[in-house]
Image (cartoon, rainbow, N blue to C red):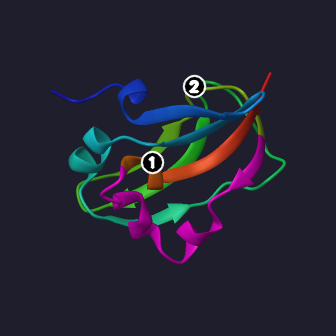
Amino acid sequence: MAMSNDDYFWTEEIAASIRRVGITKAAQSEFGQIKFVDVPAVGQTVTKDETLVAIEAEKMVQDLDSPIKGELVNVNTALADSPELLNADNEKDAWIADVRVD
């Protein structure tokens, strides 16, 4: 059974009104080895249930919709050159962006 988009992400409050977004271990397992990430840009506004990031992996190519709404204040730019970082053993290291929530 396929997971819902909500199952793909974890979020964690890292400062007042700032939430870090990353992918879950379950998503890592479903996707397989991640080979490409279209990294979003700082300053970009994201809307819940609209594309946050595009991922190409061993088992799928997919746009993933944001679990939250807000402005990107920090992105994991290392993903552009090292998309495999989203396959980190420690789920908290598999982060995509920090979002200032509305």
Outermost residue to the bottom:
81
Q: Which of 49 and 86 is in front in this view?
A: 86
Q: Position of residue 76 (x, y in %)?
A: 62, 60
Name the spot of residue 9 as percent of width and height, x first. 44, 35
Name the image quarter holding the N terminus. top left
**With 61 as the anchor, is 63 left or right in this view?**
right
Does the magenta run of residues contain 62? Answer: no
Task: Say which amino acid is labelled 2.
Answer: Asp
The magenta stretch is: 72-90
Q: Which of 63 and 68 is in front in this view?
A: 68
Q: Which residue is drawn at 46% across and 34% down?
A: 10
- Asked if 10 appears above or below 60 in the picture, the reply is above
Q: Which of marks 2 and 1 is nearer the N terminus?
A: 2
Residue 30, quarter of the rendered image: top left
In the image, what residue occupies the spot 75% across and 56% down? 41
Q: Which of marks 2 and 1 is in front?
A: 1
Q: Which residue is drawn at 69% across and 28% down?
A: 47
Q: How far apart are marks 2 and 1 (CA)?
A: 22 Å
Specify few, some or many for label 1: CA neighbours under 10 Å numbering under 14, 14-19, or 20 or more.
some
> To which residue does mark 2 refer?
49
Labelled disc at residue 92: 1
> Are there few (<14), some (14-19), or many (20+) residues within 10 Å of tag 2?
some
